[in-house]
Image (cartoon, grey):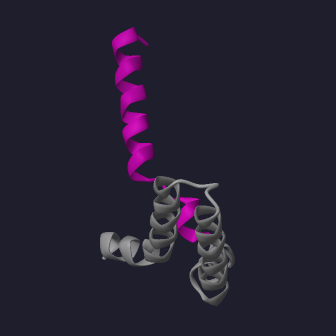
Amino acid sequence: MSRQQLGSFATFAVILTLFAASPAMAQSLDLSPVQQLLQGIVDVITGPLGLVIGTLALIGVFLMWLFGRLDFMQALWVVVAIAGIAAAPTIVAAIWN
């Protein structure tokens, strides 16, 4: 068998393998437990517990700002971070839908 015939045979074998391939294993995996775990984490962060944590963070920031331990820009960044965390599910839903 010549080198050219061997190359043609290898190319044909690769093409045949690609067309005859079965569905990927990722398509048949059930990832619902992982999805439920991650959704639970998002619900905790953006739900009532997240609201309490954000409130306590703002109280701490305002107290530190009041006593001169924190400047206004750092306080503003904390407010922006809390707003970003609270709005994250809405932003992602707007991107994916």
Does the magenta-highlighted stretch encompass residue 19? yes
Q: Which quadrant, please, contains the C terminus?
A: bottom left
Q: Position of residue 24 (x, y in %)?
A: 52, 59
Residue in the image at 59% along x and 73% along y: 58
Residue in the image at 39% along x and 10% along y: 3
Q: Is residue 80 above or below residue 21?
A: below
Magenta span: predominant SS is helix
* 32 sits to left or right of 24: right
Comparing 12 with 51, the one in front is 51
- State which region is magenta: 1-29
Q: Is residue 89 above or below residue 67?
A: below
Asked if residue 23 can be seen in this view, the reply is: no
Comparing 44 with 17, the one in front is 44
Q: Position of residue 46 (x, y in %)?
A: 56, 81
Q: Is residue 50 above or below residue 71?
A: below
Q: Position of residue 73 (x, y in %)?
A: 46, 54
Residue in the image at 58% along x and 62% along y: 65
Image quadrant assignment for residue 62: bottom right
Comparing 89 with 58, the one in front is 58
* 70 sits to left or right of 10: right
